[in-house]
Image (cartoon, rainbow, N blue to C red):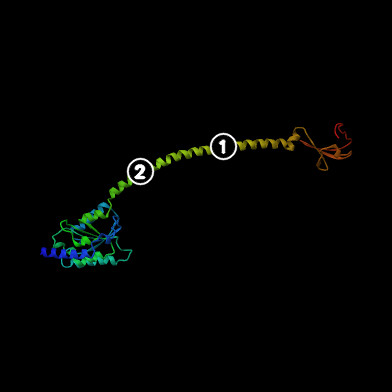
Amino acid sequence: GEGSIKKASDLLREKLKKEGLFEESRKKYVTSTPQSIGLITSLESAAYQDFIKIINNRWTGLDIHIFNVGVQGVNAVDQNIKAVEYFNALNNENTPDLLVITRGGGSKDDLSVYDDERLVRAIAISNIPTVVAVGHEVDVCLAELVADKRASTPSNAAELLTPDKQAVLSEFKSQRLQLDSMLRSTLGGKIDLVKQIKERLNNAISRVISNAETELHASRQLLSALNPEQVLKRGYSVVRYNGKAVGSVKDLAISNQLAIDMADGQLQVTIDDILKKSNMN
């Protein structure tokens, strides 16, 4: 009866407690954002339906691997142990992030599966963080005590293990608005400063270009004025002897053949006489 079951459960509870199996220090971290879950329950149970419904309502893209087991009866303990061992035996690539062992409420006798020492120890040595959610509040099963996390119901387990996508979206929008505001506040002054610097640079470049153009124009005018052809056009001429320009009568003699360059041609002449200026040495 339930009395003898409870007594045996209490004795086992004390035994396991002394072994330290219920200590928080030995429990593994249970993430609230798993990518994959190994679900151990009966496909025919309301617990399965509730868990899947809440998961799908709250989040999307979660990979759930289901191991169908009995949740009461003579074979239930062995099936649950087999499920835990199955998931732990998978290679790293296929190992789920969490295990969830769950069923709905029932009498103490119905829930005795989750007080079985073999199942409790299988959960304790699981390498995968394990959540146990048995739908009752009056008594806590030993499997819940040894689990890395306990949930009061299958629905509660689903809520604990998934973020609320609506809340996440709302928080994301809020954070985005705050970020936009910060960027506008931070960059606003910087943009004005950049505009001012850009304007100053443009003005400085314009001045440099203008000065360079002025100097270039002056240089062109000077070169034009010094161009021999321009000098000749102003009425001057160049006297050459043997192809070389002559700068003094001292370099010439009577009968020398000269070439006189003018703007529109050249004269070939012969010196008949040389007249030196009296004030020149």
**Quadrant of residue 17 in the image?**
bottom left
CA gap between label 2 and label 1 equals 41 Å
Q: Is residue 62 left or right of residue 197?
A: left
Q: Position of residue 140 (x, y in %)?
A: 18, 59
Residue 35 x, y percent position in the rendering: 30, 57
Q: Position of residue 75 (x, y in %)?
A: 18, 67
At 33% from the left edge and 47% from the top edge, which residue is drawn? 172
Residue bearing the label numbered 1: 206
Q: Which mark is residue 178?
A: 2
Q: In the picture provided, is 169 more to the left or to the right than 269? A: left
- Horizontal side of 131 relative to 269 (left or right) equals left
Sequence-first tag of 2 and 1:
2
Q: Quick one: 90 or 150, which is closer to the camera?
A: 150
Q: Nearer the viewer, residue 73 or 126?
A: 126
In the displayed orientation, state which residue is furthest to the front. 18
User: On the picture, is 58 further left or further right than 277?
Assistant: left
Give the quadrant of residue 244. Answer: top right
